[in-house]
Amino acid sequence: MDKFVVRGGNPLLGTIRVSGAKNSALPCMAAAILTEEEVVLENVPQVQDIETERKLLESMGAEVELGYGRAQHRTSIKCAVLSDPVAKYEIVKTMRASSLVLGPLVARTGMARVAMPGGCAIGGRPIDLHIKGLESMGAKITQEHGYLEARADRLKGAHIVFDKITVTGTEDLLMAAALADGESLFENCAREPEVTDLAALLNAMGASIEGAGTSTIKIKGVAKLHGARHRINPDRIEAGTFLTAGAITGGDLNVECCNPAQMGSLLGKLQESGVKLEIGTDNVRVHSGGKLTAVDVSTEEYPGFPTDMQAQFMALLTQCEGTSVVTENIFENRFMHVSELNRMGAHISVSGRSATIRGGAKLQSAAVMCSDLRASASLVLAALVADGESILDRVYHMDRGYERIEEKLRGVGAQIRRMGDVFGKK
């Protein structure tokens, strides 16, 4: 099992490039199910979740090619025949995004059998909103032995008001409605850039979708979709992670190939804490500008502060003067990094959904355990400023969502190396 060895003390200096967004690429790969023709996706990150999605689509009968060499971030998918519309547990047990194939499978084939989602143990991501929406569109759904089975001769357009904002629920039902008979109106939709990215691909495939990126989306179902070529958005969470890394190490780091317009809440909190930023159209430069001060953070749905940046920002808050409070409003079990940060010398206490951070701690190296994707990133950031050499175990969580993060960080001066088999090495 791979580990990271990180020696702290080096400021990050130079330029670091952001990869495509995993959370955009996964639903866009699922959207290829909706057509018999080829869908080509560019700027696809080489991370483990993408490999899992490839295996999932191929197990259903799709032809999937992940590019290497000059085309290493291009993926072509052709679902001419879907001989086995089942998302098997042994494939999807490590990936939360498995539910994203439910809607497109039943819309395209009339039947879907999908294992209940796996992935990070950060709290419930209830699939009941997917089920309720598909039932409103005429699907009959049963659940047994850890699988959901949905059947429908043809889905019907529906008026769906989401009980709570759900990113994957919005995406899943958006794909289903694209091939439904009639018009659909969705309200209280997720507004995340990843939803907008998916809608852009679907429209390029011949769908008729209006309002993506707002809380109300209108979809006019079509009889058939065709192939398309689409470029995946840059990963705003990876960009935020690198910006926070630059800030916590007191470096001078230019984060390029990102979209600052999609990171307003994070950039605002960084500036509020005293971090100096220079914001361009497709890059952000972070550089040390003096003492950092405590700020309070409350995670919210987009465009609020992203829950996927909560752990990394908490690592930064350990180095800010004063006391900060972080409130987690999205997932109920997303403070698993706290005990590991405290083992490195942080002063953090948790009460319910809030964590209180007494800043200004001098972090020390330690052997720590990665519990989920973003917690892993927070421990890397803490290790970058800790005194001595830290060992991070179970970094396979990191490989799910960050493309060769140790190589990118090493390129800007971090002392970080991997021990074990390198993911993706040929």
Image (cartoon, rainbow, N blue to C red):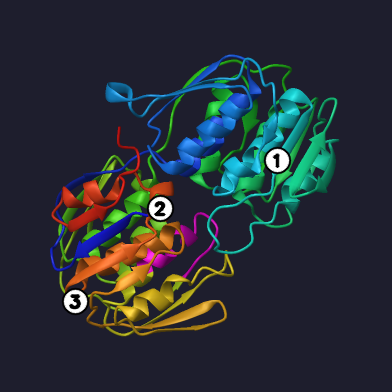
Instruction: Indicate the amino acid at tag 3.
Output: Lys
- Name the residue carrying label 2: 396
Nearest-to-viewer mark from 1 and 2: 2
Local crowd size for mark 2, using a 10 Å CA cut-off: few (<14), some (14–19), many (≥20): some
> Percent from the top left, x then y, of residue 281?
29, 41
Determine crowd level at label 1: few under 14, some 14-19, many 20+ residues with C-alpha closer than 10 A: many
Q: Which structural element holds mark 1?
A: strand
Whole-percent x, y for residue 157 in the image: 80, 32
Residue at screen point 63% across, 30% down: 209
**Mark 1: amino acid:** Val
Considering only order in the chain, which callout, 3 or 2, is on the residue closer to the N terminus?
3
| Residue at the disc numbered 3 | 291
User: Mark 3 against mark 1, which lies toward the viewer?
Assistant: 1
Earlier in the chain: of badge 3 and badge 1, it is: 1
Percent x, y of residue 356: 43, 83
- Determine whether the residue tagged by mark 3 lies in a helix, strand or loop: loop
**Horizontal side, residue 76 vs residue 276: left or right:** right
Q: What span is in magenta?
A: 298-313
Left or right, 83 with respect to 306, comes to right
Three-letter amino acid code of the residue under disc 2: Tyr
Q: Which label lies toward us, 2 or 3? A: 2
Find residue 404 and report its image quarter.
top left
- Who's the residue at 60% across and 29% down the image? 59
Q: Is residue 299 magenta?
A: yes
Q: Choose between 301 and 16: the one closer to the eye.
A: 16
Circle 1 sits on which residue?
114
Relative to 351, say whether 139 is above or below.
above
* On-image quarter of the C terminus: top left
Residue 218 is at least partly visible in this image = no
Q: Nearer the viewer, residue 136 or 338?
A: 338
Q: Is residue 323 above or below residue 66?
A: below
